Image (tube, grey):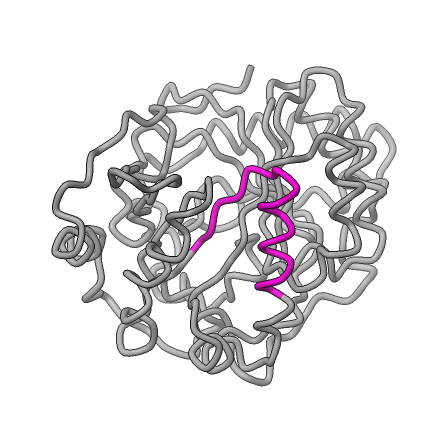
Amino acid sequence: MLIDNHNREINYLRLAVTDRCNLRCNYCMPSEGINFAKNDKLLTIEELIQVGSILVEQGIDKIRITGGEPFVRKDVMVLMRALTKMEGLEDISITTNATLIGSHIYELKALGIKNINVSLDSINKETFERITRRKQFETVHNNLIRLITEGFNVRINFIVLDGQNEQDILPIIEVMKHYNVSVRFLEEMPFNGGSKNFTSIKWNYKAILEHIAQAYPDYQKLESPKTSTSINYKIPGHQGTFGIIPSFSRTFCGSCNRLRVTATGDVVTCLYGKPKVNLRDIIREADGEENVKSAILNAIGNRAKTGFDAQQEHSTTVFDSSMTSIGG
């Protein structure tokens, strides 16, 4: 079991397989992209499997595969197959933009990987294309419907962007009310490769809820797990639910159970903090496995108490990275 220096149990790993993405969402990176990592700087699939296995042995029982866009990596299913065989790993999930998942849906279902988060910041084609700078709306929509139809546990992640997509908050709830889907609205964060900066947001979690409440005043708050980042709600008559994630306000730090390993091997104990150690070179050395275990324990033992404390570790450069390079 992994226990941090604030007595929080760490049982959830977000494991990035690539920093590359086939979309160019304007809140994530500049239109020209970022300086993506060279292939020799990425953990190989075998190394990702090894890292996952080590961490499961140390007490991780939930792994979420992230990117970039995970399915940009053509050998990602090799990792998925290996994860399903790890004893003690109870939950495998994926965060994806749903552009490339189509050809893998049946195998994912056969493997029992059913928890899929789809990043979808608009239900309107024009708005979607303006935000993503790509013409992939039909593909995403079709794959989303396929995932729902095939019985996956689908959660839609919708980042609320002032002046861009707030008009779609209510329509996406209305469209999804017929499906057993959770639509989760996230506060915007300035992890965008330094393309813009801000210290406050208009659409914080309270403003999002107030906006929804005007249309659905009879919403009901649901009980959520202690470690949930999402505050969850149910609207009577709707098959699905909605949630709000205070990703900028950071109200959930006290129960954080997450650890991140980036595609290049950086161990990140808080989204807002500096990498604590890099596992890539360690795992490639003799006695790499034991040294990785020690490095993880040391990183876990030096976690910031909150995201605000973590931000102070590199306050002038914290938002220079793109979300795609730190694992979503």
Asked whether residue 200 is in view, the answer is no
Percent coordinates x, y for residue 124 in the rendering: 43, 73
Left/right of residue 202 with respect to residue 52 in the rendered view = left
Vertical comparison of 86 with 320: above or below: above
Q: Residue at x 53, y 43 (%)?
A: 154
Asked whether residue 217 is in view, the answer is yes
Percent coordinates x, y for residue 195 in the rendering: 43, 79
Q: Residue at x 66, y 26 (%)?
A: 55
Q: Nearer the viewer, residue 251 or 262?
A: 251
Q: Nearer the viewer, residue 303 or 146?
A: 146
Left/right of residue 168 with respect to residue 10 in the rendered view = left
Left/right of residue 77 with respect to residue 324 in the rendered view = right
Location of the N terminus by quadrant is top right
Percent coordinates x, y for residue 326 in the rendering: 55, 55
Q: What segment carries the magenta color?
A: 140-157
Residue 261 among magenta residues = no
Left/right of residue 168 with respect to residue 217 in the rendered view = right
Quarter of image, res 47: top right
Percent coordinates x, y for residue 184 in the rendering: 38, 49
Q: Nearer the viewer, residue 41 or 132?
A: 132
Q: Nearer the viewer, residue 282 or 7?
A: 7
Residue 149 among magenta residues = yes
Q: Residue at x 59, y 80 (%)?
A: 134
